[in-house]
Image (cartoon, rainbow, N blue to C red):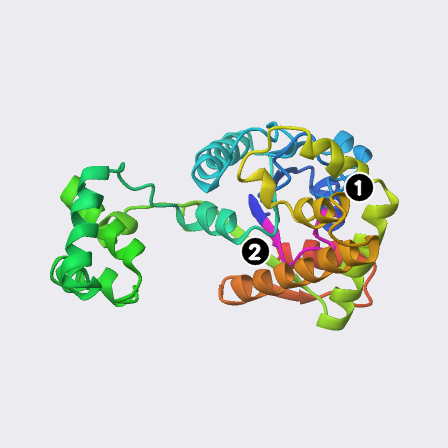
Amino acid sequence: MDNIIFIVGPTAVGKTEIAYLLAKEIKAEIVSCDAMLVYQEPSVITSKPADYILREVGHHFTGFIPVRDNYGVFEYYRQATDKIKELSGKNIPVIVCGGSGLYFKALLDGIFEGTGKDENLRKTLAEKAAKQGNDSLYQELKKIDAAAAEKISPNDLRRITRALEVYYLSGKTISEQKKSAKGLYGKFPVRIFGLNRERKNLYERINARVEAMFDAGAIEEVKTLLGMNLSLTARKIIGIKEIQGFLENKYDLKTAKDEMKKNTRRFAKRQMTWFRADKRVEWLDVDGMAAEKIKDKIYSLLQV
């Protein structure tokens, strides 16, 4: 049995229930890989797992920080990697479940945390770009780090500046430093399962989920959240901006729902693009399958 099992895919595809059923089957604990489930206060608009799921199976990185705090991929990478190593060291199977592509990649492949910032250096580089054009910095980067320059548009001044800043502050190119980033992949036995549904069916599930959120009190939840000092990362939760517009009388309830459905569908499309690009993912078409059958399918694949 593989120690670390990833269950990934777009929002509303059914990951939470499958992970729960599989965790019970193999006595695993679940490490969330969802950038918005980290927050304590929201539960409706983040589709937090039901109380019985949280009670019956050990969960990590779900509802553990307040919405006033920023929380990003760097913190997640360090903390989640430590937790997974701890569980594996106790021979407890780990299921990583979620749809946040950056969190997923950080866990698997590591992350480049980079150097600090130097505002004076940035100002100097900005002045050079203003006087001599962006291409002057781009050509400078090509001489220093051709591999990084190939991946950056000559017009992307922000990324060019950051690559130069990393080199001038550390003496190492950003390409070199990224190579030194290490994740779980290759160190631990890992299997990655992606859940897939026909787009039409997935979108119907998304639309139904949004309707259910409103029935479950999404408006009241967002009203409460807006009264808090929301961090920049917490403000990215889908539902806050859309319902805020309704609460401020900018549009009616139907428009709020439609905006939330549309933005969730767009998010799901981005998720699929991200995960489809990773050839390590084993895809399962789950349309028409009961959750128990999907769990059984994954369990049987784990025996191979």
Residue that label 1 marks: 219
Q: Does the rendering let one see residue 173? A: no
Q: Where is residue 88 in the image (x, y as percent from the top left)?
A: 52, 35
Report if residue 79 lies within the magenta region: no
* x then y, percent, for residue 69: 54, 29
Q: How many marks?
A: 2
Marks 1 and 2, Cα distance to the nearest angstrom? 36 Å
Residue labelled with disc 2: 192
Q: In this view, does 185 lie to the left or right of 36?
A: left
Please state which of the two labelled residues, at mark 1 or mark 2, is closer to the viewer.
Answer: 1
Tell me if 164 is positioned left or right of 2 in this view: left
Which circle's residue, 1 or 2, is located before the other in the chain? 2
Q: Nearer the viewer, residue 141 or 95?
A: 141
Q: Residue at x 40, y 45 (%)?
A: 183
Q: Is residue 221 in view from this perspective?
A: yes
Residue segment shown in magenta = 6-16
Q: Residue 274, position in %: x, y?
A: 52, 62
